[in-house]
Every structure is written in structure tokens, then in C-alpha cells.
């Protein structure tokens, strides 16, 4: 299993959000760098999950999950106020990091899952 995984739930429709494109990047602290290194790209499965997203271990640092919510909204015929959602978070240990996204047309939230 990847060190970082995600799960997207469509709270407006009350079901998993299948087909959401997701990108995992590491944010480089060096100000002279490009700043973001893409580690993996995937799409949520029928259960709204991405379990194979990048390496099975990642070093401590800052990471970002970018969700293409515009593509998902278009596919489901919903309005889209937030065409993308970016969640930036810090990895400080070697534990698994699960970062779910709760999504609706006019709101979203996230948390550190298990």
C-alpha cells in the first residue's frame, strides 16, 4: 500500500466519488527549485478510493494532493464552485497517511484518516 492514500466521498449524492483525478506532489522547500515534484497521478475507483498512489514510504516533508473536482462535477452533472481542491499537509513520521476529502458542489472538508 502507498504511504499516502485518499478517499473521496460525494456528500451531496451520499456516495463515493468515483472517477476523480488525483495528483500527489512533494513540495520542495528549496526556493530555487520548481517547488513541486509530482510523485503519482491516479483516479478514484468505484469506492472513491486511491490506494496505489506513490511510493510505499515517503520522507518527512510537505506534500499536496490535488483533486480535479471540475472533471468529477462535469461527469456527474453537478454544479462546481471549486474546480480543484488542493490539500497540503506535513508528513513528520513513517506512519501511513490517509487524507480523505468530503465533497459537495459548494463545500469541501478534509481530515487525517486512519
Image (cartoon, rainbow, N blue to C red):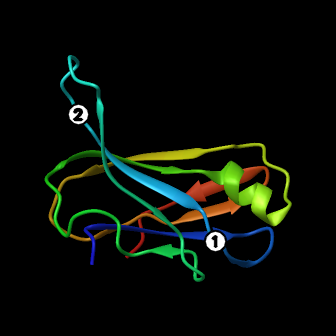
The residue beneath circle 2 is: 28
Judge from the rendering whether residue 72 lies leftward or rightward of residue 76; answer left or right: left
Residue occupying image coordinates x 62% and y 68% = 19
Mark 1 Cα-neighbour bin, 10 Å: few <14, some 14–19, many ≥20: many
Of labels 2 and 1, earlier in sequence is 1
Mark 2 falls on what kind of element?
loop
Judge from the rendering whether residue 92 lies leftward or rightward of residue 84; answer left or right: left
The residue beneath circle 1 is: 9
What is the CA distance from the residue labelled 2 to the residue labelled 1? 29 Å
Residue occupying image coordinates x 54% and y 77% = 45
Q: Which quarter of the picture shows residue 16?
A: bottom right
Q: Position of residue 43 (x, y in %)?
A: 52, 66
Q: From the viewer's perspective, is residue 100 above or below residue 86?
A: below
Q: Front-most of 93 and 24?
A: 24
Q: Where is residue 27 in the image (x, y as percent from the top left)?
A: 29, 37
On residue 55, which mark appears? none
Q: Dividing the image into 4 quarters, which one contains the C terminus?
A: bottom left
Amino acid at each position: 500500500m502507498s504511504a499516502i492514500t485518499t478517499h473521496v466521498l460525494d456528500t451531496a449524492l451520499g456516495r463515493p466519488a468515483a472517477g476523480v483525478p488525483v495528483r500527489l506532489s512533494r513540495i520542495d522547500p528549496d526556493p530555487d527549485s520548481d517547488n513541486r515534484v509530482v510523485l503519482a497521478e491516479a483516479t478514484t475507483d468505484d469506492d472513491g478510493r486511491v490506494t496505489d498512489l506513490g511510493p510505499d514510504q515517503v520522507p518527512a516533508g510537505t506534500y499536496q494532493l490535488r483533486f480535479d473536482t471540475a472533471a468529477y462535477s462535469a461527469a456527474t452533472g453537478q454544479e462546481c464552485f471549486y474546480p480543484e481542491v488542493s490539500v497540503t499537509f506535513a508528513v513528520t513520521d513513517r506512519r501511513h497517511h490517509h487524507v480523505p476529502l468530503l465533497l459537495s458542489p459548494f463545500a469541501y472538508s478534509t481530515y487525517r484518516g486512519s
